[in-house]
Image: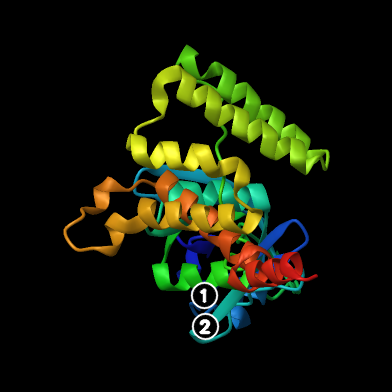
């Protein structure tokens, strides 16, 4: 159904373009909805315009949908069907918090997206004259329309709102699982609380204890005895730069299968992708501090008389 006044269709939505920009605590999505305007016999019926109203927006994916709230039309938006067919557009703005963007990207899961909008407009007369045809019912008009958003366009929107500067992902803390992992889960929560409180050394300590608890529960220790014994024996004597190097090597080993042919995509999950991005990004940020140049500088200072 298209927007209509009385029994006459006056506007029909034909498509939409989506843009974005960052705001404090989230992003604004700008949805420009294009309309085809059908000629309106204003000489006989009087001039009339449509005032767009807030539109409820739902994002639809291959495996479900997510309600995004209401998109607000530009306050100055007014659609006035002329005496001949033409085109027009209405600019809607949808504000999304960072948490909403996280939920949206998690639900999209790398697939395509469609925006389902309930388009509502109130027809208003710009003038009334006794000579115009009476009896035209002026009531709110509603249209429900789904607009496909190409993946390339959506990825451009993500970049414009800062997705590639600070990746919008959700780190799901292990809140449930086997009883054997309960100690480790509690230690992770302690680590989060310590991080939020600025006690970073305590954060690292709690994470270490969580891994120890994981191994004690029987979920660790699968490395060969030679490798495990060497690392455990020398861990206390390794410098921070050397431990950073070991971490980098460990991540290279973990990610190595994807670097070679013949590994099916289903071997990797979204959690694997989040882990790879988070740790790799952290390593890149820490490299200037604990990388080769920093290690050489530290060694020079230690050997100086």
Q: Is residue 203 left or right of residue 110?
A: right
- Which dot, 1 or 2, sits closer to the camera? 1
Q: Is residue 153 above or below residue 86?
A: above
Q: Is residue 198 above or below residue 300?
A: above
Q: How many marks?
A: 2
- Mark 2 closeness class: few <14, some 14–19, many ≥20 residues within 10 Å: some
Q: Residue at x 64, y 53 (%)?
A: 239
Q: What x and y, as percent, mark residue 123?
A: 65, 63
Contact, mark 1 vs mark 2 (Cβ under 8 Å): yes
Residue that carries the numbered disc 1 in the rendered image: 34
- Mark 1 closeness class: few <14, some 14–19, many ≥20 residues within 10 Å: some
Q: What x and y, as percent, mark residue 147?
A: 44, 63
Q: Is residue 14 left or right of residue 210?
A: left
Q: What x and y, as percent, mark residue 110?
A: 40, 56
Compare residues 79 and 55 and report the one nearer the observer.
Answer: 55
Q: What x and y, as percent, mark residue 223?
A: 35, 37
Q: Residue at x 43, y 58 (%)?
A: 114
Q: Secondary structure at mark 1?
A: strand
Q: Nearer the N terminus, badge 1 or badge 2?
A: 1
Q: Is residue 257 left or right of residue 211?
A: left
């Amino acid at each position: 159904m298209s927007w209509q006044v009385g029994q006459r269709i006056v506007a029909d939505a034909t498509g939409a373009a989506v843009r974005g920009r960052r705001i404090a605590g989230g992003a604004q999505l700008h949805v420009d909805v294009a309309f085809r305007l059908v000629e309106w016999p204003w000489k006989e019926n009087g001039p009339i315009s449509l005032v767009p109203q807030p539109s409820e927006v739902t994002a639809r994916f291959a495996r479900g949908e997510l309600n995004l709230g209401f998109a607000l039309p530009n306050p100055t938006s007014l659609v006035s069907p002329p005496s001949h067919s033409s085109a027009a557009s209405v600019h809607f703005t949808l504000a999304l918090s960072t948490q909403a963007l996280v939920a949206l990207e998690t639900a999209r899961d790398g697939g395509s997206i469609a925006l389902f909008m309930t388009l509502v407009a109130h027809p208003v007369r710009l003038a009334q004259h006794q000579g115009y045809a009476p009896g035209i019912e002026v009531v709110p008009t509603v249209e429900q329309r789904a607009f496909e958003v190409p993946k390339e366009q959506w990825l451009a929107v993500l970049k414009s709102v800062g997705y590639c500067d600070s990746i919008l992902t959700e780190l799901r803390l292990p809140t449930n699982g086997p009883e054997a992992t309960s100690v480790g889960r509690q230690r992770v929560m302690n680590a989060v609380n310590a991080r939020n409180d600025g006690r970073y050394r305590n954060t690292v300590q709690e994470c270490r204890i969580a891994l120890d608890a994981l191994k004690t529960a029987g979920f660790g220790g699968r490395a060969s005895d030679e490798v495990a014994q060497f690392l455990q024996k020398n861990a206390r004597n390794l410098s921070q730069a050397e431990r950073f190097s070991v971490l980098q090597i460990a991540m290279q080993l973990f990610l190595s299968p994807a670097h070679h042919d013949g590994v099916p995509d289903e071997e990797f999950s979204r959690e694997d992708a989040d882990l790879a991005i988070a740790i790799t990004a952290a390593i890149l940020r820490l490299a200037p501090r604990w990388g080769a140049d920093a290690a050489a500088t530290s060694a020079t200072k230690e050997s100086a008389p």
